[in-house]
Image (cartoon, rainbow, N blue to C red):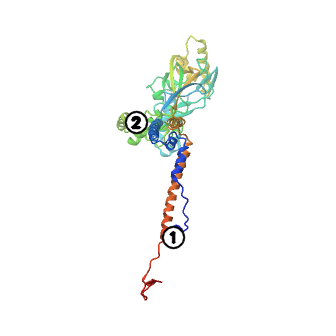
Amino acid sequence: MSSDPITDEKSPKMPDIKFKDELTDIASGSTIHGIANIFSTNSAFKRILWILAFFACVTLVIRQLVDIFILYSSFPIITSFKHELYTEFPAFTVCNLNKYRHSKHEEFKRKMEKLANEEYARKRAHNTRDELCILDEIYCSMTSLVLNITSYTRWRSTRYGNCYTFELKTDVGIMDGLDGGINLIFNLEIHENTTTDFEPGIRFVVHPRGVVAMPHEEGITIKGGERAIIGITQTGIHRLQTPKSPCRTNDRHFGGIYDMKACRKLCRETIIQEECGCYEFDESISLRTPSIADTCKNTNFDCSKRVQGDLALNLGNYCDCPVACRETNLVLSDVREPAFKSNSLDDRSQLNMMSNHICGTIYGAMPQRNCPLNRLKRENTLTENFVKIKLYFKEPAYDIWSEEAAYDQIQMLADIGGSLGLFIGASVLSLGELLEVVGMCVRALIRRRQNSIHTVDQIQETQPEKLTLDDIDCTNDIVETK
């Protein structure tokens, strides 16, 4: 009895693994609720109910997950509040309302005439600005100790001339109340006045450390002979940088702390300079940037005003100046009184002591009777030569408002886990089951493809050999094959 060569042939077929049985085994032991009931029940009605219930829960969990991701992508923010003790005194900037010394005025005229000579101008150009400007004697007292302040940063304002920014040591003046703080006395040298635009005095501004001072916009004017009692209330704002609420942390122009007002001011000046080839006369930030042309007060005045009018309405479209991530706001209360009371023995004694000290140090080379302060004393205008300032913190601590993420990644993961566990009982370990099912499906597809290819090869190898005319012997009456 002949046998089928196909069935007798030994072939290296892969083991026949029942995919359905494996899938049923995994599903029956699944930790995801509902799947085990679908595959283990023998009742068709129960299986339909479990399938409907499972897909209803899957629909609900998908909706929950969508809501969770929408909430997270909206970057909600909450604001927290806390008190902190003062650790440093803010910076302050002072500008004398009188730009130039009267005693240098005639000398300046002579130099300006010589500037027509190019060689003289080249040799002396570095001196023609600084020696005209006044660096006043500034005295500072903390807890009855009087110091002559010499540590400062000088910068030029086109409106006020030389301005000086002071940042005291971090532990100076931090005690709150009128008993703490610092006391400042400024020598105005009113005998050197060259302008009648302002009364003798100073422009004074208190600002956070490292931030560009703006005397014209934020400062206060203190006249000669006045004492300003300035109380400081500080508030800190710490913003959270998010894609929907961008803020800036550093200032690429000045290398210091970023300030939105300074950024907008510099942007406005830059646009005016590019459009008109000059800078606005009243601005001060211009002088901290390179390649500055002439002031617009002297040239291109109409162009400057036109550009400023356009920027007043559309500055936000030209300038990228977001809020600062860390911002310090200072609120000042200002009370004025006479710097020296005529009926106060202590004030008269202090006035005489300061005038004698100045005459002996600054004007020591001239006879004492020729000291300008002695002339002011004879004219009863000596008190107008000084400005006194009392700076103090009104409270022992300041408020800090901080933005925090109301919904962070940890909260999002917790909500995702809660939704998956509530509706379908899934967890992180359930992902292992899903990966196992995926791997099993991939292996089954590979086996099926390999078995299909192997079967085709076997069929081709076991087909009967085709006969040709050469294989047939036609000489006999009975046809036989060779």
Query: What residue did someone put label 2 on?
Result: 316
* Front one among 331 and 423: 423
Left or right, 52 with reference to 367: left
Above or below, 191 against 345 in this view is: below
Q: Which element is circle 2 on?
A: helix
Q: Position of residue 54 (x, y in %)?
A: 47, 39
Q: Position of residue 400 (x, y in %)?
A: 54, 26
* Front one among 359 and 476: 476
Above or below, 466 against 34 in this view is: below
Query: What residue did someone put label 1 on?
Result: 5
* Front one among 333 and 361: 333
**Residue 321 visible in the snapshot:** no
Under mark 2, the amino acid is Gly
Under mark 1, the amino acid is Pro
Q: Residue furthest bottom?
A: 475
Separation (CA) of disc 1 from disc 2: 88 Å
Left or right, 261 with reference to 82: left
- Determine the residue positioned at 44% across, 79% down: 467
- Determine the residue positioned at 49% across, 64% down: 453
Label 1: how many Cα within 10 Å (few below 14, some 14–19, many 20+)? few
